[in-house]
Image (tube, helix red, strand yellow):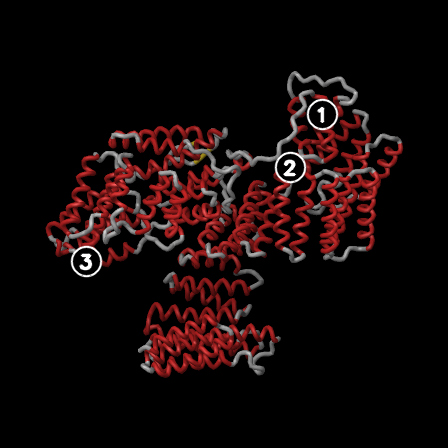
């Protein structure tokens, strides 16, 4: 019941704790009505200020001037009725009204200027500096495009004052000025304290992250641009008060080749089309969306279904018309009000922008929207080497394609595609040429190319059918050699890719016998014969790999015979390409059997052989395999270099079938090993994007890479980026993932949310995860999840749910003990209990610590392994903290001294049956904990109990012990505290 001023004030405090949005805004409106029943200026002013704030951050800024007029009326009538905070807010929110008037095209310029004068006069009369007044004049100048530089200098020449905009927001405005002047580098330098998190506010650094996106791209700082997008968009998503930044993030996606991601953002924010209270912000949003939609229209995707304003089914073409109509009209209203075309000119400049990168920027996140765009990005591919011109003469074109095919040259595919196009023309007539051959031969070759394309798509059935079609056409053309070769290849197309596929050795043996007979008759070309031998080598390699780690003598012998025969024949026939391929099988087999030095040497010789034979287009796959072997050998630095070479050569030669995704993934792993985390993040992001392009067949691979990427991001302090990546893994498609991969992603997401102190969302993830793993045989996982969920729920102030989760942890522990983790959970829960309830929570906290002690005693009796000294010392230490909070200082000191004693005995012979190295590690760990316990003891002794001399003596001894143990940082902490007590 809101029947007293105190009740209304309590409701206002409760509403203030809610996130900005419709619920908070509607409640604020209701509370204004409730406050009106009282002749209490304090309550009425607080209710109006709460409503004004709700409007400001919920996309209804245009309503704030009306509310503020009521605030000002109260102020003028009864300024003494305003509390200290409310008095400050009256003057602060003059600026909010100035911005709201500026952002609404129906408000005349004269009215805006009058308000600026009102602000100036009120500030001057109250004794405030006029820097905020000049800031508002600058914003007006930028908006209208008149006398901007002079207004900027008048503003920035004055020092900041009590009523200046927050440091972060002013910093962004100064950076925007530099961007408008074309100095991106200077703008980013100005923004650095905001982007680094040193200067923040309710909406910063998120607005600055959106503003920095394009400057970062233009400056080539792509990693920072990705991070700003991932972190900034998470905050802006779905917030009406952040309508402009959302538009900037969508624009960023369009200009980095991430159109599917842009469409996903558009779908998530379609409600922003309905925002009416922030016209200038809506115009910025519509323009950002138009950049994306116009790019898709230019790329020929006009009929693609997209999200738009509710109530209509939209395509790219229809939404583009709507956007142009609405945004042009809105811009024209601003221009008419301003008497300049500054607003329309800024809009035109944004729409004129084109993609800023040669290839799509890998963001690390998955985009589920419009998968068909993945095959046809609006961004041009990266420049490759110059290819040789296509012969105009059709016969010359075919003959050249055949030559390149034998060499395995990547240009062969391009020439065959051109041949297919010309042969399909209605007016095509097959030339009569003996060297070209019969039409059936050309038809067979084109059928073979179509089969290659199908196999590259992993469509094994279509590929095999295409090869059989080619074989039949070769037979009709009187070419039994190529016919046999293509039929033989059908025997191996499923090996290694289709589950259950086995080698048809009888068929391969028959094919070899027939090939040798044809060769004796002179009807088998050398390269066709080598392909049959290669098919046998491939099959033998498959059988060997399947039989590892202990292949039978027959399997190993068949591999040696098949690969050795292939290699010898290739050398005899002068085919450097085929000889190199045979040695790759040998090197791969050696690596898989642990003979890494042998594999490395073999592959380096292959590279030298290909270089000598002037066949550089075959090096990417050899380099990729060499990189893998080097990584296995523990040479990650060399592996990084080799993987980079492999990828560069693959791009250079246009090898579209190269396994880019796995190579980028392995490059990421190698970068992690050499602690090049930036390189790892870039490589893993690219790997995930490449797997995405493969479609549904690579969903799990993409998810696994993203889990690894998130782990690197979180480990390098980029928890918000990691969370964004994991949220994209756990979208609607997550149901198809392996359950353990799904559990890992959800666990990592929950931990990332904890890092961000988003405890309620983290708790939801932990609870979902607990349900997921509850029936697993591995109940240790359930114990771990329930323990982490308990603490997160407690941090989220959901204590009943935390108790329930603790019950699940106890139950799971009974089935699969995790003594150390459950004990640690109980200790931390005791700490949180005291932090929340103070001295009143002491009994509950001590009970939790007693339970932790009981876990150790039970484990001791049952012979379970656990970290006994860590558990005992931790309980003493935490009990001391709890007692100190409850002002039971003598007891607290006694407990912490027990902790010091436990930690001090670690590493002694009777306590430590470990190796010398393990003992050293344990000693360092325990000495560090002992130093912290000494610090707490000194605080209690010297501060709470008033014994500074004893505290100094304790600290002096502790410092000496830390220095002897090689813990200089711990010694410095104790020394700083000793100095404090020594000066008292």
Horizontally, is 518 left or right of 60 in the view?
right
Horizontally, is 56 left or right of 301 in the view?
left
Numbered label attached to residue 653: 2
**According to the image, label 3 marks what residue?**
84
Residue lying at the far left of the rendered structure: 77
Secondary element at tag 2: loop
Question: Marks 2 and 3: CB-CB under 8 Å?
Answer: no
Secondary element at tag 3: helix
679 or 28, which lies in front? 679
Mark 1 / mark 2, whichever is N-terminal: 1
Residue 261, x across and y down, in percent: 47, 41
Q: Could one spot residue 854 in this view of the protein?
A: no
Position of the C terminus, as image quadrant, is bottom left
In the image, is residue 853 above or below residue 587?
Answer: below
Residue 760, x across and y down, in percent: 40, 57
In the image, is residue 355 above or below residue 421?
Answer: below
Mark 1 / mark 3, whichever is N-terminal: 3
**According to the image, label 1 marks what residue?**
398
Horizontally, is 53 left or right of 578 in the view?
left
Residue 618, x across and y down, in percent: 70, 40
Dot 1 alpha-carbon crowd within 10 angstroms: few under 14, some 14 to 19, many 20 or more? many
Q: Residue at x 16, y 55 (%)?
A: 82
> Mark 2 or mark 3: which is in front?
2
254 or 346, which lies in front? 346
Q: CA–CA distance between discs 1 and 3?
A: 87 Å
700 or 203, which lies in front? 203
Q: Residue at x 58, y 79 (%)?
A: 912
Dot 2 alpha-carbon crowd within 10 angstroms: few under 14, some 14 to 19, many 20 or more? many
Secondary element at tag 1: helix
Q: CA–CA distance between discs 2 and 3?
A: 71 Å
Q: Residue at x 23, y 42 (%)?
A: 98
């Amino acid at each position: 019941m809101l029947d007293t001023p105190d009740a209304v004030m309590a409701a206002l405090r409760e509403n203030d704790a809610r996130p900005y949005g419709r619920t908070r805004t509607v409640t604020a409106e209701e509370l204004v009505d409730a406050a009106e029943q009282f002749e209490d200026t304090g309550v009425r002013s607080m209710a109006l200020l709460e409503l004004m704030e709700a409007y400001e951050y919920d996309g209804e800024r245009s309503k704030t001037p009306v509310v503020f007029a009521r605030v000002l009326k109260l102020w003028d009538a009864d300024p003494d009725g305003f509390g200290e905070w409310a008095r400050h807010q009256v003057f602060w929110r003059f600026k909010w009204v100035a911005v709201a008037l500026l952002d609404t095209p129906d408000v005349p310029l004269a009215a805006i200027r009058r308000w600026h004068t009102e602000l100036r006069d009120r500030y001057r009369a109250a004794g405030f500096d006029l820097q905020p007044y000049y800031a508002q004049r600058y914003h007006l100048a930028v908006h209208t495009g008149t006398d901007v530089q002079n207004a900027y200098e008048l503003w920035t020449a004055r020092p900041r004052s009590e009523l200046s905009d927050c440091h972060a927001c002013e910093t962004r405005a100064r950076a925007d000025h530099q961007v408008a002047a074309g100095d991106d580098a200077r703008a980013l330098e100005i923004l650095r304290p905001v982007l680094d998190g040193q200067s923040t506010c309710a909406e910063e650094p998120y607005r600055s992250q959106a503003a920095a996106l394009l400057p970062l791209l233009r400056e080539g700082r792509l990693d920072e641009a990705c991070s700003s997008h991932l972190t900034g968009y998470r905050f802006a998503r779905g917030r009406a008060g952040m309508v402009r930044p959302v538009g900037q993030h969508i624009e960023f996606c369009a200009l980095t080749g991430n159109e599917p991601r842009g469409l996903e953002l558009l779908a998530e924010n379609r409600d922003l089309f309905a925002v009416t209270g922030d016209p200038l912000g809506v115009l910025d949003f519509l323009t950002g969306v138009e950049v994306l939609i116009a790019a898709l229209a230019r790329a020929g995707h006009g009929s693609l279904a997209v999200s738009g304003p509710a109530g209509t089914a939209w395509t790219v073409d229809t939404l583009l018309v709507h956007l142009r109509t609405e945004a042009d009209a809105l811009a024209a209203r601003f221009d008419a009000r301003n008497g300049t075309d500054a607003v329309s000119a800024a809009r035109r400049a944004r729409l004129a922008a084109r993609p800023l990168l040669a290839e799509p920027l890998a963001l690390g996140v998955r985009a589920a929207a419009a998968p068909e765009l993945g095959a046809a990005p609006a961004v041009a591919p990266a420049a490759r080497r110059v290819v040789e011109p296509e012969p105009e003469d059709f016969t010359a074109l075919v003959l050249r394609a055949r030559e390149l095919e034998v060499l395995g040259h990547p240009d062969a595919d391009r020439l065959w595609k051109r041949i297919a196009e010309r042969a399909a023309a209605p007016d095509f007539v097959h030339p009569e040429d003996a060297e070209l051959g019969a039409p059936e031969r050309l038809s067979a070759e084109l059928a073979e190319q179509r089969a290659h394309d199908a196999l590259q798509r992993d469509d094994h059935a279509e590929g095999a059918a295409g090869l059989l079609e080619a074989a039949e056409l070769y037979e009709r053309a009187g070419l039994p050699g190529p016919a046999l070769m293509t039929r033989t290849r059908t025997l191996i197309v499923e090996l290694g890719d289709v589950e259950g596929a086995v080698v048809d050795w009888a068929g391969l043996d028959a094919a070899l016998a027939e090939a040798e007979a044809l060769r004796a008759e002179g009807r088998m070309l050398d390269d066709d014969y080598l392909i049959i031998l290669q098919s046998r080598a491939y099959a033998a390699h498959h059988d060997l790999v399947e039989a590892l780690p202990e292949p039978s003598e027959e399997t190993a012998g068949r591999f040696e015979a098949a690969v050795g025969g292939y290699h010898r024949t290739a050398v005899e026939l002068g085919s450097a390409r085929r000889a190199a391929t045979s040695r790759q099988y040998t090197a791969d087999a050696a690596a898989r059997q642990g003979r890494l030095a042998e594999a490395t040497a073999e592959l380096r010789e292959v590279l030298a052989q290909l270089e000598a034979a002037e066949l550089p287009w075959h090096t990417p796959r050899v380099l990729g395999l060499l990189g893998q072997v080097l990584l296995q050998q523990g040479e990650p630095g060399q592996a990084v270099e080799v993987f980079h070479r492999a990828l560069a050569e693959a791009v250079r030669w246009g090898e579209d079938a190269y396994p880019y995704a796995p190579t980028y993934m392995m490059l990421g792993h190698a970068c992690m090993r050499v602690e090049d985390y930036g390189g790892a993040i870039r490589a893993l992001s690219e790997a995930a994007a490449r797997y995405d392009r493969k479609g549904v067949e690579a969903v799990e691979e993409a998810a696994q890479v993203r889990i690894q990427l998130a782990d690197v991001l979180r480990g390098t302090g980029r928890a918000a980026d990691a969370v964004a990546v994991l949220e994209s893994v756990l979208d609607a498609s997550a149901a198809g993932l392996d359950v353990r991969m799904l559990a890992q992603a959800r666990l990592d997401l929950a931990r990332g949310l904890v890092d961000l102190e988003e405890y309620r969302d983290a708790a939801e993830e932990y609870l979902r995860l607990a349900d997921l793993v509850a029936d697993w045989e591995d109940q240790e996982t359930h114990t771990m999840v329930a323990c982490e969920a308990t603490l997160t729920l407690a941090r989220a102030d959901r204590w009943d749910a935390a108790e329930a989760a603790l019950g699940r942890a106890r139950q799971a522990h009974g089935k699969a003990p995790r003594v150390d983790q459950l004990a640690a959970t109980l200790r931390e829960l005791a700490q949180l209990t005291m932090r929340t309830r103070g001295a009143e929570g002491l009994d509950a906290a001590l009970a939790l610590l007693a339970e932790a002690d009981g876990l150790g005693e039970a484990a001791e009796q049952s012979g379970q392994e656990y970290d006994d000294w860590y558990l005992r010392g931790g309980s003493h230490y935490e009990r001391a903290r709890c007692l100190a909070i409850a002002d039971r200082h003598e007891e607290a000191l006694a407990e912490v001294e027990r902790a010091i004693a436990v930690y001090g005995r670690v590493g002694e012979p009777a306590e430590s049956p470990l190796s010398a190295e393990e003992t050293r590690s344990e000693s360092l760990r325990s000495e560090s904990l002992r130093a912290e316990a000494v610090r707490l003891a000194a605080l209690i002794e010297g501060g709470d109990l008033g014994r500074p001399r004893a505290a100094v003596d304790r600290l002096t001894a502790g410092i000496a012990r830390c220095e002897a143990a090689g813990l200089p940082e711990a010694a410095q902490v104790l020394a700083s505290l000793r100095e404090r007590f020594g000066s008292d």
